[in-house]
Amino acid sequence: MGLTLNNDNTTNINNFEEYSEQFEYQNQHLYNLLFERNQDLIKSKKVGVASANLKKVFESTFKLSSKIGFHEMSLRDLSKDTGLSMGGLYSCLTKKEDIALMVLDIVELVSEKNNQAALEQSDELQSLEMAIRSYLYSSTILQPWFFFLYFETRSLSSENQIKSKKIELTTIATLEKIIQSGVDKGIFDVNSPYFVATTILIVLQDWYLKPWKNKEKNISLEQYSKHLFRMVKKLLRI
Amino acid sequence: MGLTLNNDNTTNINNFEEYSEQFEYQNQHLYNLLFERNQDLIKSKKVGVASANLKKVFESTFKLSSKIGFHEMSLRDLSKDTGLSMGGLYSCLTKKEDIALMVLDIVELVSEKNNQAALEQSDELQSLEMAIRSYLYSSTILQPWFFFLYFETRSLSSENQIKSKKIELTTIATLEKIIQSGVDKGIFDVNSPYFVATTILIVLQDWYLKPWKNKEKNISLEQYSKHLFRMVKKLLRI
DNA sequence: GTCTATATTCGGATAGAC
DNA sequence: GTCTATCCGAATATAGAC
């Protein structure tokens, strides 16, 4: 199991490998979940077939759209890359936009879990560490999903654009709440909890938005995580 | 004039208003410059006519593409919003992609100037302050341009995508160089100059990428600038 | 359920009038 | 130089065979 129990019964994450073992939103589980949560959008009714096709669709979508953008990627491109026919594509979609909708759904779900896990910790510094680790680790496993949502939010309807923005704002608010709580207790010393919170978030985002920067510099996930946590402690004067 | 002279003959920026007064890449100057630098792409040969049309084209492009994306914005949309006919559009463009190319050109130009201005300062802390101010101020004046390039880099040819990435890497490298120099002199105390540099950059980017976040929180440009500079000093242990 | 073939719309770009 | 009308290719989505 990837989680260890603290004295106070809250859970903790030690490293990426352990986290990854218990992270449920990946591999076949992820696509089964997608199928369950979006049965209204999916014509095919057999879990096995549909989720196998969904897997192909998302992998190809991420590959193609990361280079040229979602809108520029045609369904013909997608058909070629997945090996599915146009009919095959439309067996697990009702329209192109569904792909983006499902990405929004998953990122929203995972982000909520991350925020909850952070808030469940017993003290503020642990909460911040949990927030940082869970966000970094989950966005590493689901890098293409997080990346896609960031750059393709504008492909969504304005209603869903708002949903997408809200994910970001809720995460910042969660971090800010934790920091403010630490300030109130006299653990942290900082002028603007909001500014620290938003800075943490964009550093977290930078990890999945610009992975090439860190690859070029040979910065590993654990190094990045430590850098960030050290920075946070400096900003909070710990 | 917006620049004041220091004792050592380097220039300094005091506030946005002063900076804005002397910033040459705005209003009619900007579009005249665009015309001069892209005569090969522009059929129309009269400066006045062409730059007036370019102004309309860019203003409408930024308005439309910020909501739905550049690729989703059709030239018919653009024609309607600018009030120009299709023929009118093609009098100052040879193809749609030219718009994105010209944005790249301007952002590149301004970024280079910013980096130079930072490096010309006499001491490292002043260099960082100059980098932060010039980047924040110029990206405020040219917010749609910087925003567009960030989100539409993928609409460019792979050759130009590299150019766009390079702007970012060069700015990080400039900041890193300044910090490293300060570390060598014993002025700054920091483990990873690169990490601080990249953090500064993404905080700078966040200002023009997510202006709504700061509007909601009523954070002004000068407040943001001070927050960031204070953060930098904490990270450098000054 | 999945395929091929096709209907239909819409995009970028152009030709030719004025 | 700018407009209108039009071409042509490409995109999404569907219909109907197997």
Image (cartoon, coloured by chain):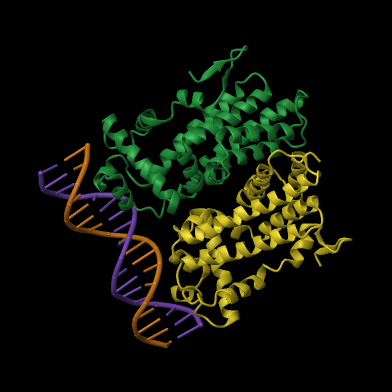
Chain colours: A yellow, B green, C purple, D orange
Quarter where residue A194 is shown:
top right
Q: Would you say B138 lies left or right of C7 here?
A: right
Q: Residue at x 71, y 45 (%)?
A: A218
Q: How many marks?
A: 0
- A201 and A79: which is toward the camera: A201
Q: Residue at x 45, y 58 (%)?
A: A71
Q: Residue at x 78, y 30 (%)?
A: B189
- A108 and A121: which is toward the camera: A121
Return the x and y of residue A118 as percentages of the image width and height: 74, 57
Return the x and y of residue B26 as percentages of the image width and height: 42, 30
Relative to A101, say whether B172 is above or below: above
Q: Residue at x 61, y 24 (%)?
A: B119
Residue that lies at the very extreme toward the right in this rendered image:
A7
Residue that lies at the very extreme toward the front in this rendered image:
A184
Relative to A42, say whether A14 is above or below: above
Report if residue A2 is visible in the image: yes
Q: Would you say B171 lies left or right of A10 here?
A: left
Relative to A63, say whether B52 is above or below: above
Return the x and y of residue B205 as percentages of the image width and height: 57, 41
Report if residue A156 is visible in the image: no
Quarter where residue D1 is shown:
top left
Q: Quadrant of the N terminus of chain A?
A: bottom right
Return the x and y of residue A221 as percentages of the image width and height: 73, 51
Q: Quadrant of the C terminus of chain A?
A: top right
Q: Would you say B127 lies left or right of B31 here?
A: right
